[in-house]
Image (cartoon, helix red, strand yellow):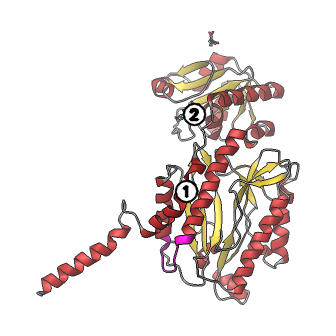
Amino acid sequence: MGQSCVLLALVAALLYCLRDSEPGLTSPLETCAWNHLEPHLPLLSVAPIQRSEFLARQTALARELDAAGVDAFIAEPSASTSYYANISSGFHLSERPFLMVIDKRGRFTTLVPKFEAGRIAKLDMVFDNKTTIAWVEEESPYEALARGTGYEKVMIDEHARFMIAAGLQEAGIEVVPMSETVQTLRSVKSEDEIALLKGINSFTLALVQSLQKCIRIGMTQEQVVDASQALFTRAGVGHGFWVLVLFGDQAALPHGGETGRTLQEGEFVLIDIGSELYGYCSDVTRTILPTGATVSDDLMAVWKTVLEAQSAGLSRMNVDEACSAVDGASRDVIQQAGYGKFYTHRLGHGLGLEGHEPPYLNGANDQKLKLGEVATNEPGIYVTTEEAALLGKKTGFGVRLEDPILVTKDGGVLLTGNRAQSPWSP
Ligand SMILES: *[C@@H]1O[C@H](CO)[C@@H](O)[C@H](O)[C@H]1NC(C)=O
Ligand SMILES: *[C@@H]1O[C@H](CO)[C@@H](O)[C@H](O)[C@H]1NC(C)=O
């Protein structure tokens, strides 16, 4: 065989090997995990929010506005407009305001740039009867709104930009911040919202469990990331997908930051992952081991401490419990195990149309949990390699376990369906 033939054969062999990493082709990890995941697809068969529920939300808001003595509620495209009127938070915000206005009598108004009115009218907005105020480039949008409505005092959504509040004030309208009562309208979930959150979060856990059965020592972070994305996409819920895959000491930074690692024996894999079902978010974390792999007894003890901290938090996720007390219960367990200063973040956050929303479970929040609220329960212990040396250990690590919990009259209920049993049984 001539030299050029050897070279050609080598190139061909190389191309053959690279096949798996080309986009569009199915990796062995994806194929293996899909076999485990496919039977769980029915979890995603949940109906989107119906028109009648959107209208009921508008009525409930109107009632609160009336009670608060304000004329109307004003929001820019955001989770709030998704919630009240099905106006996607993905609508691009420009310097020209497009506002959703719901008043204390339940009347629905949009303020739109005149040249955009046609495009905005095509949105799948939900309302009973809509008034459109179109402002032209030669006038102040806020004066157009003031003139068109006569409102004197409005409540402004937490996500609206400062320029909106400033512009309204300049046009002579008094502006007040969103009240806790109005915030509660969205943080307390309806039956249909709970069904959607249960669907996407239990499916997300099933996906992590499927990955665990197929991940092997020697795989790269990118292989796990790519397979996760491919699995969500194949299930029809790829929109909204995100993931953190961290090996060993990479997980010492709770949100990671490094890439390009290969999984070694003796390392945990931390997977923090989520996607969306009709706008409702999932957020699940598991710290796992491939079948047959192990970590030191020391690391296993850390894993168990985190699980106990999660149990302690869960046992306090009851109606009327202060958010700070729930956080504190999980923190006590980790403190007693000697890792107090390595639990560097709050216990959790609300979950719904936003990946992070009220209620926030942290030491400073004295708000009480309400019936029907959903919040993640996600304690963790994070030790960098530098800190590990001070503790007499060789390498750093990070362990976190996370399940979103629904607050019911009988206590906290898992929206994932089940908690982690062990690193091999997530
Ligand atoms: C909400 O918007 C989505 C996406 O545009 C649409 O598919 C759905 O039908 C809308 N819902 C209602 C109740 O109109
Ligand atoms: C809708 O609102 C407009 C303007 O306020 C009003 O003239 C009209 O009668 C309303 N229609 C219905 C069906 O309520």
Q: Which residue position holds label 1?
A: 39
- In the rendered image, the quadrant that contains the C terminus is bottom right
**Residue nearest the observer in this picture, 222 or 75:** 222
Q: In the figure, residue 254 lies in which quadrant?
A: bottom right
**Residue nearest the observer in this picture, 312 or 97:** 312
Residue 199 placed where, x, y %? 63, 49
Residue mark closest to the camera, 2 vs 1: 1
Q: Secondary structure at mark 2?
A: loop
Residue 50 placed where, x, y %? 62, 32
- Residue 200 sits above or below residue 301 on the image: above
Magenta range: 213-222
Number of other residues with Cα within 10 Å of mark 1, as a class: few under 14, some 14 to 19, many 20 or more: few
Residue 401 placed where, x, y %? 69, 66
Q: Amino acid at mark 1?
A: Pro
- Residue 131 sits above or below residue 126 on the image: above
- Residue 295 sits above or below residue 277 on the image: below
Q: Residue at x 68, y 39 (%)?
A: 192
Number of other residues with Cα within 10 Å of mark 2, as a class: few under 14, some 14 to 19, many 20 or more: many
Tell me if the residue at label 2 has its CB under 8 Å from ligand 1. Answer: no
Residue 252 placed where, x, y %? 64, 74
Q: Secondary structure at mark 1?
A: helix
- Label the magenta part by its dominant secondary structure: loop
Does the magenta run of residues contain 219?
A: yes
Relative to 23, 140 lies left or right:
right
Calculate the distance from the C-alpha at mark 2 to the C-alpha at mark 1: 33 Å
Q: Which residue position holds label 2?
A: 87
